[in-house]
Amino acid sequence: MDKIWTAVWRSLENGVPNVLLDVGICTALLIVAVAIYIWMTPWEDLKLVQSGNTAAGVALGGMILAMAIPLAFSLKLSTHWIDLVVWGTFSLILMIVVFFAIDLLLRGLPARIRDGHVGAAIVLASAKLAMAALIAAAVSG
């Protein structure tokens, strides 16, 4: 039984620092990407959410989840923290570009979201989540 606990302890000693590093890197990348997106949008996402605009909350929440999907695939496939930073950064830059393309293609939706139309927010969030799944699959090879 002592051998089992020793093996478990060694596993934790080796694994926990790596997990904390990976989660820290991914969290930092996600925060930076979300901040850039919020900064670049023509409307004030956080103020709309804080004022009780459900549609803005759905759109913002969908965007955050969509950013995390390719980042999670980058994490799964990375072999080193530098690999994670490179592929995570690449996938998030690609997501930001794709998000703004979606916003341009679905022109009237952002204004409708500002006005509180939840249906428009669901369409916008769904389009971003769909692209996130495609980019995640592409990143994973």
Image (cartoon, helix red, strand yellow):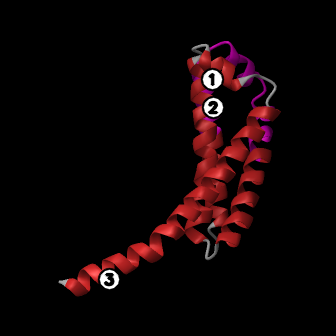
Give the structural element (helix, strand or loop) at label 2: helix
Residue 71's place in the image compared with 66, above or below, is below
- Which numbered disc, 3 or 1, marks the residue that appears first in the sequence? 3
Instruction: Indicate the amino acid at tag 2.
Output: Leu
- Above-or-below relation of 113 to 103: above
Instruction: Give the crowd class for mark 2: few <14, some 14-19, many >=20 residues within 10 Å.
Output: many
Residue named by callout 2 = 60
Tell me the element at label 1. Answer: helix
Q: Which stretch did the figure color magenta?
A: 98-127
Amino acid at circle 1:
Ala
- Specify the principal SS of the magenta part: helix
Q: Quadrant of residue 134?
A: bottom right
Distance CA(mark 3)–CA(mark 2): 43 Å
Residue at (77% x, 52% y) in the render: 93
How far from the left and from the top, in percent, is residue 140? 62, 68
Can you identify the residue that label 3 sits on? Answer: 7
Q: CA distance from mark 3 to mark 1?
A: 49 Å
Q: Residue at x 59, y 71 (%)?
A: 77
Quick one: 42 or 3, which is closer to the camera?
3
The label shown at residue 56 is 1
Q: Could you tell whether 8 is left or right of 141 in the image?
A: left
Most extreme residue toward the bottom, as rendered? 3
Residue 136 in view (yes/no): yes
> How many angstroms separate mark 1 from mark 2 (CA)?
6 Å
